[in-house]
Image (tube, rainbow, N blue to C red):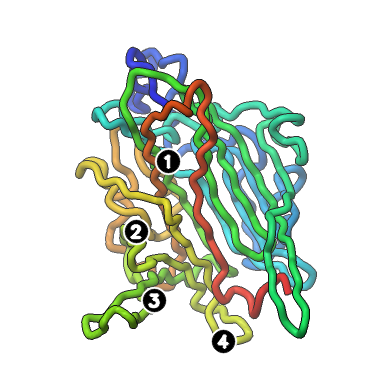
Amino acid sequence: MMHVQAGREREIDRAAPAARACPPWRAPAIALGAVALLLGVGAARPGAAHAAANAFCSGEQLAVGANWSVCWEIRANEGLAITHAFYTKPGFDRRVLSDATVAQIFVPYETGEPRYHDVAYGLGPAMQVLTPTQDCPGGVLLAGKKVCREIEDRGLAEKYCAGGGCATRRGKTLSLWSSVQAGAYNYLIRWEFHDDGSFEPRVALAGVLQFGRTAHFHNVYWRLDLDIGDAEFDRVEEFYRIIPAWSDGTKGVNGWSKLLGETFRPTDLFTFRKWRVVDTRQVNARGNAWSYEIIPSPGDGSLRTTRAEGFSRGEFWATRTRASERFVSTNTADILSTYLNGESIDGQDVTVWYVQHAYHEVRDEDAPYMPIEWLGFEVHPRNYFDQNPLD
């Protein structure tokens, strides 16, 4: 689809001398692991596991709507980040997320070069000012007009017939989004929180068609710390559905298997593979453990590159939560793979990473301005509630 002009050089390496010139269309790399907040609140204050969101943030950094209370901030590398998210309604106030970010957008070209690591260059400084009439007409602009907060109709949430009649329920979504300029591209970073307890991290690809390079990938790495009630006592499980050798193809079996140590896993749409984070100490009224499950997008592909780019080995990663382990890669280093050092993740505070892939091959309809293309996946409650929270 869009291509970087052939004469443009690679983005500056974060380890390069300060005197080296930076191409005008990209920002210099920002040192990872020492990420400053550009806008919004500072680091979240510690609080009890079931504290309301306003114990962690206030003012415009607290977004409320569609049965959610969400804290957010802008970080130099990751841009728009979620710091806490609680599902809230009368008589119910329970944490789901402690931290959620775009940890990398890796853009390798089919020619082998360039290979961009956009989060290492800093999404925060590249955030654009939005307009109230075109970008955010039904919402509220925040953070110097760089974040749009909206509460939207998400369409049909339920439709059923029972007791001699039929009924329909429409749903609501609380969304926070921003626009980031990265070369000829615009990335729209969007967090959607739905009134049924599910949420969707999404990235849109848009911009102006350029010429001179071949097809390329956009690999979006999401980092989620799902603290479902308690921060610790997590367990990660993988769903499988297989056809046994003894079956003639008409019967299958399914189940969940535990991932006991830090690991990575590829997607497998054939087996309906997905993952969930379980709180091992909390159960609902039916005796089932609270959990949230990550459901891969059916349109996702995969990308496996070189040993030096070990972060490309899988679409799902599970690691112990460490404040220092927040990024995937730089121009010169594979970081994500180094987090796998044999630690147990069973009953610990766990961070999960999920990767999405978009392949761009130019078409005539991309000129002169590329239609927006969305990448996203769903994170659903599983046994987090006693029943459908909308009923």
Which secondary structure lies at badge 2? loop
Q: Estimate how packed mark 2 is, as few (under 14), some (14 to 19) or many (20 or more) residues with alpha carbons within 10 Å.
A: many
Quarter of image, res 21: top left
Q: Which residue is mark 1?
A: 104
Which secondary structure lies at badge 3? strand
53 left or right, relative to 239: right
Quarter of image, res 85: bottom right
Q: Which residue is mark 3?
A: 256
How far separated are the C-alphas under marks 1 and 3? 29 Å
For the residue marked with disc 4, what is the amino acid? Gly
Tell me if I can see residue 229 in this picture.
yes
| Image mark count | 4
Please state the horizontal and vertical placement of residue 375, each as a whole percent of the image: 49, 45
Q: Earlier in the sequence, mark 1 or mark 4?
A: 1
- 1 or 2: mark nearer the eye: 2
Which secondary structure lies at badge 4? loop
Q: Are marks 1 and 4 in contact (CB under 8 Å)?
A: no
Please state the horizontal and vertical placement of residue 346, each as a whole percent of the image: 39, 72
The residue lying toward the viewer, choosing from 253 and 348, is 253
For the residue marked with disc 1, what is the amino acid? Gln
How far separated are the C-alphas under marks 2 and 3? 15 Å
The residue lying toward the viewer, choosing from 74 and 154, is 154
Q: Earlier in the sequence, mark 4 or mark 3?
A: 3
Q: What number is the disc on residue 287?
A: 4
Q: Which residue is mark 2?
A: 267
Tell me if I can see residue 264 in this picture.
no
Relative to residue 141, is residue 174 depicted above or below? below
For the residue marked with disc 2, what is the amino acid? Thr
- 1 or 3: mark nearer the eye: 3
